[in-house]
Image: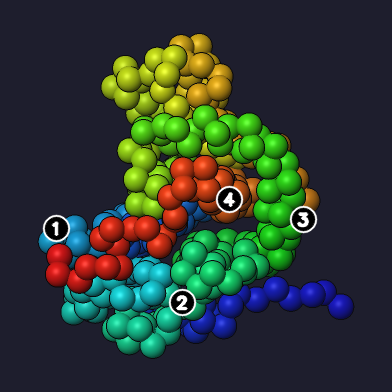
């Protein structure tokens, strides 16, 4: 008997709502760390779909820009960890007013975003609850299921079974990667903990992980100046700040844009100092059980989960708490 791998019930319900609907555009909308998962989701959709163009928007810009392509034939996919991000809640309302179908991801189904969307897809997040999870229940895992459901429906391409099998194996990949990277993190952490500036770099499906790590970890949680540099955009201005003292974290993924990251690594090591260049290379991970077609898409989750541990190592050395020490985030509500 052949084992059947089905998407999460929330995903299945959201996809079912597309019955009888024409869809001609997909919008990925969020803020901050939730926005970071939208980049690899679009990357996957771009590579698999001939029929569904898409855009990624910051939630506030989405409502203010008011794209003319937003119509009743649109699907708008949103995400907010707690479901309380005001801009994302407003974006869901804006999309629904245009007649679009809204599918939102959150850990809190009864949140304002959950209540203000057509469909809520739940996920688990250790960053908000402190409770370890299986990666197959992460927001990455859920949004990829949504994307593959769209591709199956509108392009006739069936990849859901292979994805679900791959997600079952993902947590093991992450756990083994932690072991592989631990000595490297121990080597780099004392030096990086002393830095006021650390840049992150990636391309393709991994760019969102670089963005989130710079914006939501190094700057938000450690007050370390940072910026996510696209591996090819690096050569169009940003490489001028590289010298023997600058520190970089380069994520080298497994998708079709890896040559861009290879080129960036060669330049970093040519003009920088090796002790300042932390390269996290997905070819060093054991992806046993993960279908080769999804290794590039799942590498960003391995990057972020492993580097999350590196961030806590930096925090310990800097004697600076992670989320608890934030000055403004979750402490002010008048901005």
Q: Give left or right: position of 139 versus 218.
A: right
The dot on residue 289 is: 3
C-alpha separation, residue under disc 2 versus residue under disc 3? 27 Å
Q: Mark 1 highlights which residue?
A: 65
Which quarter of the rendering shows the N terminus?
Answer: bottom right
Q: In the rendered structure, which disc, 2 or 3, sits on the residue that comes first in sequence?
A: 2
> What residue lies at 35% left-to-right and 76% top-to-bottom?
83
The dot on residue 264 is: none
> What residue lies at 35% left-to-right and 83% top-to-bottom?
111
Tag 1, which secondary structure?
Answer: helix
Q: Quadrant of residue 120?
A: bottom left
Q: In the rendered structure, which disc, 4 or 1, sits on the residue that comes first in sequence?
A: 1
Asked if 213 appears above or below 226 in the picture, the reply is below
Depth check, mark 4 against mark 1: the one in front is: 4
Label 1 close to label 2 by CB (< 8 Å): no
- Spot occupied by residue 98 in the image (x, y as percentages of width and height): 19, 75
In this view of the protein, which residue sits in the foreground, 147 or 205?
A: 205
Q: In the rendered structure, which disc, 3 or 4, sits on the residue that comes first in sequence?
A: 3
Tag 4, which secondary structure?
Answer: helix
In this view of the protein, which residue sits in the foreground, 188 or 289?
A: 188
> What residue lies at 55% left-to-right and 22% top-to-bottom?
275
Q: In the rendered structure, which disc, 4 or 2, sits on the residue that comes first in sequence?
A: 2
Q: In the rendered structure, which disc, 1 or 3, sits on the residue that comes first in sequence?
A: 1
- Spot occupied by residue 7 in the image (x, y as percentages of width and height): 60, 75
Which quarter of the rendering shows the C terminus?
Answer: bottom left
C-alpha separation, residue under disc 1 versus residue under disc 2? 28 Å
Q: Mark 4 highlights which residue?
A: 309
Label 4, residues with CA under 10 Å away: few <14, some 14-19, many ≥20 = some
């Amino acid at each position: 008997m052949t084992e059947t791998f089905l998407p999460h019930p929330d995903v299945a319900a959201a996809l079912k709502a597309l019955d009888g609907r024409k869809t001609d555009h997909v919008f990925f909308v969020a803020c901050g760390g939730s926005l970071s998962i939208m980049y690899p989701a679009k990357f996957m959709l771009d590579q698999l779909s001939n029929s569904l163009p898409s855009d990624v928007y910051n939630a506030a810009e989405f409502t203010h820009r008011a794209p003319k392509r937003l119509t009743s034939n649109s699907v708008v996919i949103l995400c907010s960890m707690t479901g309380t991000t005001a801009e994302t809640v407003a974006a869901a309302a804006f999309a629904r007013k245009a007649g679009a179908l809204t599918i939102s991801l959150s850990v809190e189904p009864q949140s304002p975003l959950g209540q203000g969307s057509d469909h809520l897809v739940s996920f688990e997040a250790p960053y908000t609850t402190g409770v370890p999870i299986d990666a197959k229940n992460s927001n990455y895992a859920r949004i990829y299921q949504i994307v593959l459901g769209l591709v199956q429906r509108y392009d006739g391409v069936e990849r859901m079974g292979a994805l679900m099998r791959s997600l079952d194996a993902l947590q093991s990949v992450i756990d083994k990667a932690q072991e592989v990277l631990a000595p490297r993190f121990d080597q780099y952490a004392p030096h990086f903990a002393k830095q006021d500036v650390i840049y992150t770099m990636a391309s393709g499906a991994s760019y969102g992980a670089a963005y989130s790590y710079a914006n939501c970890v190094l700057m938000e949680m450690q007050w370390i100046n940072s910026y996510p540099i696209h591996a090819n955009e690096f050569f169009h201005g940003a490489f001028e700040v590289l010298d023997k003292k600058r520190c970089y974290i380069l994520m080298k993924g497994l998708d079709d844009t890896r040559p861009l990251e290879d080129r960036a690594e060669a330049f970093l090591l040519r003009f920088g100092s090796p002790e300042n260049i932390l390269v996290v290379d997905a070819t060093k991970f054991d992806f046993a059980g993960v279908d080769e077609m999804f290794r590039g898409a799942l590498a960003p989750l391995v990057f972020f989960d492993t580097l999350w541990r590196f961030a806590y190592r930096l925090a310990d050395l800097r004697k600076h708490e992670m989320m608890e020490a934030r000055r403004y985030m979750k402490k002010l509500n008048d901005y």
